[in-house]
Image (spheres, rainbow, N blue to C red):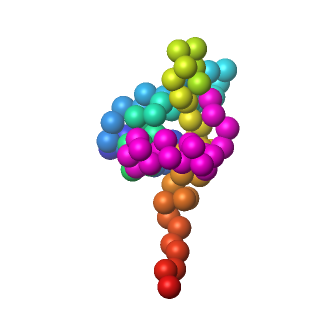
Amino acid sequence: MIYGIRGYAKRYIDMSVKIEGKSYYRTAEVCRIVGISRNTLFRWLEKRVVGKEYRDYRGWRLFTEDQIDTMKERLSRITTVE
């Protein structure tokens, strides 16, 4: 196993993009790290769950480690249904 962002175990190579010393992750990698589908990620982007949006020179979405942590926290919430 390879260990990537903040100790999360990953089974693939870290393909983060380094810009001005900060790591950014692309859509497909974020979906694998968090364990969600692209549809879920895009729905969260529409609802502004993830926060500020970053893009590279091609217009591709980029995500920070903090945003990935926010998504993981959202997945760990439990709600009660009455």
Q: Which residues are magenta?
A: 36-54
Residue 53 is covered by the magenta coloring: yes
Can you name the residue that lies furthest to the top here? 57
Left or right, 39 with reference to 23: left
Residue 6 visible to an observer of this rendering: no
Which of the 4 image quarters holds residue 62? top right
Question: Which residue sits at x=49%, y=41%?
Answer: 42
In the foreground, 74 or 3:
74
Question: Which residue sits at x=59%, y=24%?
Answer: 55
- Residue 39 position, x and y percent, is 41, 44
Residue 81 visible to an observer of this rendering: yes
Residue 20 versus residue 39 in the image, above or below: above
Residue 7 is covered by the magenta coloring: no
Which of the 4 image quarters holds residue 73? bottom right
Can you name the residue that lies furthest to the bottom here? 82
- Residue 48 position, x and y percent, is 63, 46
Question: Which residue sits at x=51%, y=80%?
Answer: 80
Question: Which residue sits at x=32%, y=42%?
Answer: 11
- Residue 8 position, x and y percent, is 45, 49
- Residue 1 position, x and y percent, is 32, 44
